[in-house]
Image: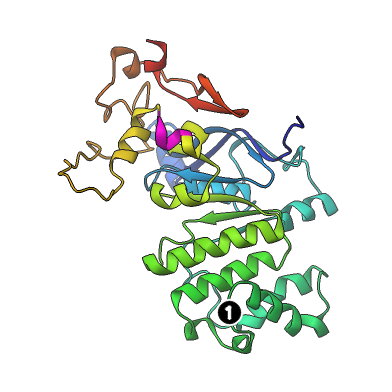
Amino acid sequence: MSTPDVILSLRDVQRRYSQPVDLLARIGAMIRREGEPPSVQAVAGVDLDVIEGEVIGIVGESGCGKSTLGRMLTGILPPSAGEIFYRGQSVTSMAGATRRRYELGVQMIFQDPYSSLNPRMRVIDIIGEAPIVHGMVKRANKESFVSGLMQKVGLDPAYCYRYPHQFSGGQRQRIGVARALALNPSVIVCDEAVAALDVSIQAQVLNLFMALRHEFSLTYLFISHNLGVVSHISDRVAIMYLGRIVELADTDTIFARANHPYTQALIKELPVLRTDMRQFDPIKGELPSPLNPPSGCPFHPRCPKAIARCRTERPLLKVLEDINEGAPHLSACHLNDV
């Protein structure tokens, strides 16, 4: 059996945000003998291999670092530490044509279809500008190229000279999809790409993603806080909490036998169609501040199963005994050692 190709790899990837400090503030801090200003650890060391052709869902509460992770994968943000590899080569060491292939090969679809499109540009330029700049399409062929992409994403090509404000939210998101496809990418990072849409429109856009996946041989990283949406589109699911992946497995395993208490709590909150009464038991407390993360396991202040070890020692992401078809089930929980 052949080994699947890894298209993206992350090794201990981290991202810190520090508040900018001017010269006078620095001098004042030196006089008061204060240390460096506090920094936010948005992503605190992520290891992940993305297999070519798969859809991997990245799930977690707001503030867990999933969007920051997506922006680092697309090159929008540089990692503060760690390495990102594209087709086996470190992104940091890339230059020239190799760097260009990476930048074109990994595209992003943003959450808000209203603010992610330039309101002063017509759709024909929003979709067609980048391929022309990069020499992928001749200017004389721009209209036919854009028309073809608009048809692929379910838009009428006759609307290509309209502005974004003349479209609905779902149509604008389709424009964003067409813009990403215009550069012939291998990987598309979808950052909450359906969160701002009505439920009925969400289903249409998700079906579009799946149809395009097979037609263009795409790899998706689908970032979402909604496990229900992720269950319909993903092959594997990574659960993030406070900047780290706490559980990773194929979708069936995550929903059938989630291991980490945080994943179990998220799944319990999913709405289900049942005739009997069901008690709603939300996760206690709030996501801790990344400025002052808890010691030990970051989830222990909210975990009903926490033990003494959880308060002092951070659990590592380990392979569990059950392995499904070569895709290991990973979890970071001390309860697995008890």
Residue beneath the point at 35% across and 23% down: 295
Could one spot residue 167 in this view of the protein? Answer: yes
Q: What secondary structure is the magenta-colored segment mainly?
A: helix
In the image, 187 versus 36, the foreground residue is 187
Extreme residue in the top direction: 338
Residue 206 location, x and y as percent? 50, 61
Look at the image and tell me in which quarter the N terminus lies.
top right
Look at the image and tell me in which quarter the C terminus lies.
top left
Residue 302 location, x and y as percent? 26, 30
Q: Residues within 10 Å of mark 1 (few under 14, many from 20)?
A: some
> Within the magenta stretch, is there residue 143?
no
Which range of residues does the magenta coloring cover?
253-258
Residue 301 location, x and y as percent? 27, 28
Please state which amino acid type lies under the numbered disc 1: Leu
Element carrying mark 1: loop
Extreme residue in the front direction: 275
Residue beneath the point at 45% across and 37% down: 239
Is 224 positioned to the left or the right of 101 in the image? Answer: left
Is 119 positioned to the left or the right of 298 in the image? Answer: right
